[in-house]
Image (cartoon, rainbow, N blue to C red):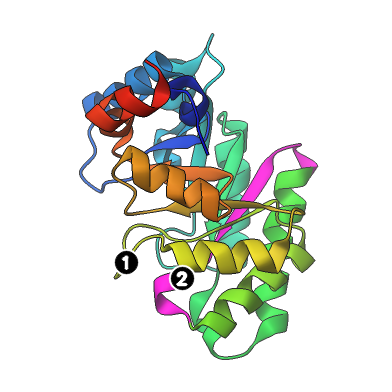
């Protein structure tokens, strides 16, 4: 796929989820997102009021992660966090699937957890993504997690938190895209550091990219060659 820099930027959720992120670093992330007109800024829910203020008068959306990064939060707590984040300005919510319950084969529990979030988020007219943490799952579990997410009403499935043993892999993105077809979005996150890697993920089926190396990707030498900028 051939994209301009502006087109690729709109695939990117510019991400700052570091535990030691300061207000200054969050502001820098927002400033970079506005400069390059990315799809969004993705942060921990605490920062959503600040990010919403920083992004006003732009078309860059605030995104909050919830139940992050382990996926082991009580469902009621996730729903509360999601509702609070949306009330504070989040346009999208990225939740973490209950990894342990998925691996235990408790499909009804996993589906109910996602559905509770999907119902809450959709009631406010917003978008829900489900992080599978693919590096901890078998191929069959990746497919199952994608199918349960779709059945529960999610809008996207997402590869990774970026806090576990590995990030997005091309084969996993392809597998997720095959599992959900064109019915859901697929977000590849973690480990995308170059223009070429970003394009490979999109070619594999990703419709969104979770990236912290946004500036390097969009301004690198290969970006200049391939984007026409």
Which numbered disc, 2 or 1, marks the residue that appears first in the sequence? 2
| Residue located at (57% from left, 28% from top) | 89
| Residue located at (31% from left, 54% from top) | 191
Q: Which of 122 and 79 is in front in this view?
A: 122
Q: In this view, does 123 lie to the left or right of 86?
A: right
Q: Nearer the viewer, residue 87 or 197?
A: 197
Q: Which of 129 and 27 is in front in this view?
A: 129
The image quadrant of residue 110 is bottom right
Q: Secondary structure beneath disc 2? A: helix
Image mark count: 2
Residue for badge 1: 166
Residue for badge 2: 134
The stretch of residues the image draws in magenta is: 123-137
Which quarter of the figure is the C terminus placed in?
top left
Q: On screen, 156 above or below 212?
A: below
Contact check, label 2 and label 1, Cβ < 8 Å: yes
Q: Is residue 154 in the magenta section? A: no
Q: Is residue 130 in the magenta section? A: yes
Q: Secondary structure beneath disc 1? A: loop
Camera sees residue 224: yes
| Residue located at (56% from left, 64% from top) | 174
Q: On screen, 23 above or below 163?
A: above
Q: Give the percent coordinates (x, y) of residue 183.
A: 77, 54
Q: Nearer the viewer, residue 218 or 154?
A: 218
Q: Give the percent coordinates (x, y) of residue 73.
A: 50, 67
| Residue located at (61% from left, 33% from top) | 91
């Amino acid at each position: 796929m051939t994209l301009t820099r502006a087109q690729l930027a709109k695939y990117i959720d510019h991400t700052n989820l570091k535990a030691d992120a300061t207000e200054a670093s969050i502001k820098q992330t927002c400033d970079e997102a506005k400069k390059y007109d990315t799809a969004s800024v993705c942060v921990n829910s605490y920062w959503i009021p600040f990010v919403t203020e920083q992004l006003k008068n732009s078309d860059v959306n605030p995104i909050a992660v919830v139940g992050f990064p382990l996926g082991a939060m009580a469902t009621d707590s996730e729903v509360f966090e999601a509702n609070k984040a949306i009330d504070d300005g989040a346009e999208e919510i990225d939740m973490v699937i209950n990894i342990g319950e998925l691996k235990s084969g408790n499909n009804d529990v996993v589906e109910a957890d996602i559905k509770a979030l999907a119902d809450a988020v959709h009631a406010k007219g917003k978008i829900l993504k489900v992080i599978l943490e693919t590096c901890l799952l078998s191929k069959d579990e990746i497919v199952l997690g994608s199918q349960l997410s779709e059945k529960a009403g999610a809008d996207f499935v997402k590869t990774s938190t970026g806090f576990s043993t590995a990030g997005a892999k091309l084969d996993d993105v392809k597998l997720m895209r095959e599992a959900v077809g064109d019915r859901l979005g697929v977000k590849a996150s973690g480990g995308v550091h170059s223009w070429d890697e970003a394009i490979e993920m999109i070619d594999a089926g990703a419709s969104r990219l979770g990236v912290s190396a946004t500036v390097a990707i969009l301004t690198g030498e290969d970006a200049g060659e391939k984007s026409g900028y």
